[in-house]
Image (cartoon, coloured by chain):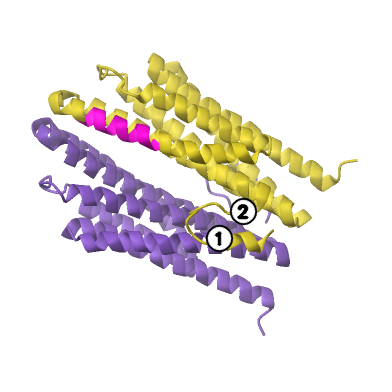
Chain colours: A purple, B yellow
Amino acid sequence: MERHFDTSLRELKEQLVTMAGLVEKAIEEATQGLQSADVERFQNVFDLEKKINQCHISVDSACLKLLALQQPLAADLRLIFAIIKINTDLERMGDQAVNIARNAQEYIKAAPLKPLVDLPIMFQEVRQMVGITLDSFVKNNEPLAREVLKRDDRVDALKNKIFKDVLEHLKTHSAQVEQGLTLILIARNLERIGDHATNIAEDVIFALKGEDVRHSAQVSTIKSALK
Amino acid sequence: MERHFDTSLRELKEQLVTMAGLVEKAIEEATQGLQSADVERFQNVFDLEKKINQCHISVDSACLKLLALQQPLAADLRLIFAIIKINTDLERMGDQAVNIARNAQEYIKAAPLKPLVDLPIMFQEVRQMVGITLDSFVKNNEPLAREVLKRDDRVDALKNKIFKDVLEHLKTHSAQVEQGLTLILIARNLERIGDHATNIAEDVIFALKGEDVRHSAQVSTIKSALK
């Protein structure tokens, strides 16, 4: 029979996975909404964000209860610690999906920059990165989490290319400066989603291995603290 | 005599306050660096960020140790929970200071947009907001934390005004599109610092009162969980 604590921890993990599913959906709706100029999808993002915010509060509450009532140790404590952090990153990914939807709402009101530069490629890259991140958490899979860390550079490179291409375009199409800026802000929103995915992957590695890979060039003191 | 746990908790708080001081300094150096076109100040920001990252790891490590060894309850647990979150926000404020310094480094290489629009006002507003936030934590002062929440709207309004002014300027000065974009990105970086300050203020209120004021239109379930 499962211990009461194990049941609570399993339920907490399930709650986080549900929340992550809403975040994935919000990112998909925001990016597809821009590509298909479909305003209904933007409304879906705003509705999803409300649910994500409710999960945010509810996951924190569950973490606090577990810490207070069960006083977990070692791997269990590391997992709860990681969930507290992942919860924050998921909520902020939801915020970024809303930012993309709001920017895209403005963008589709005027004539599009032709073409949408590399944004569709960046959409795909970021959605894949988020998918792998959540998979690594669900499956307790460290190699998948490490795969995420490698992909962040690709997302950053795509953002830089989009910045460059848009600026180049605007030099000869100055009337489109607002549209160009909006695309740049969307690329920045996507980059931030990639950053949050990276944070989550680092937390997954910490939960699984007790290894703190953040700021990785620096000496990790956390490793010895809770092995 | 102070209990061992109280000593550890006091030391943890002091560690966070030291980190917060580094973050304040980094924001000051980044913004003053732009205003005075002083590249040495940008280097100071990069150096400060390394120290901030060390603090980030070290504060998390101390929180985990306290949770594992002392199994704190009620107000003590709330404080540690808040510190885990504040630590994340402080580290990301450091990242934003670096972003400002990098953007400013590019900006000062070319002819400035004339004038720097409302950025200096926004610098001052954000620095004040960060100062009040940290004061609210150091002094356990709930009204100060609530003051921060009110100020966030002012920072957002300044960002919107800067966006508008720069876009207006670029319509007749299209050769300055890169410079204009850089100022817009800096305004966005500052807005994010304001968001992190808001997050911290919400965590201070939670630590002091057990009241979850995040997503404030929504029902708080955390309040009942750990009063």
Q: Chain of mark 1?
A: B
Relative to A11, B29 lies left or right? left
Q: Residue placed at 49% from the left, 65% from the top? A: A137
Q: Quadrant of residue A72?
A: bottom right
* B166 inside magenta stretch: yes
Q: For this rendering, which residue is in front, A65 or A39?
A: A39
Whether B25 is drawn above or below A121: the answer is above
Q: Label 1: how many residues lie within 10 Å, few (<14), some (14-19) or many (20+)?
A: some
Q: Nearer the viewer, residue A89 or B166?
A: B166
SS category of the residue bearing label 2: loop
Prevalent SS, magenta region: helix
Q: Residues within 10 Å of mark 2 (few under 14, many from 20)?
A: many
The answer to whether marks 1 and 2 mark residues whose Cβ atoms lie closer than 8 Å is yes
Q: Name the amino acid type tagged 2.
A: Glu
Cα–Cα gap, marks 1 and 2? 8 Å
Residue occupying the point 44% across, 35% down: B96
Residues shaded magenta: B156-167
Output the chain of dot 2.
B
Q: Which mark is residue B220?
A: 1
Q: Position of residue A84 (x, y in %)?
A: 57, 57
Q: Residue B212 versus residue B62: which sits nearer the camera?
A: B212
* Badge 1 amino acid: Ser
At mark 1, the secondary structure is: loop
Q: Quadrant of residue B121?
A: top left
- Can residue A84 be seen here? The reply is yes
Q: Are marks 1 and 2 on the same chain?
A: yes
Q: Give x and y (percent) for residue B45.
A: 48, 26
Residue position for label 2? B211
Residue A126, position in %: x, y? 32, 55
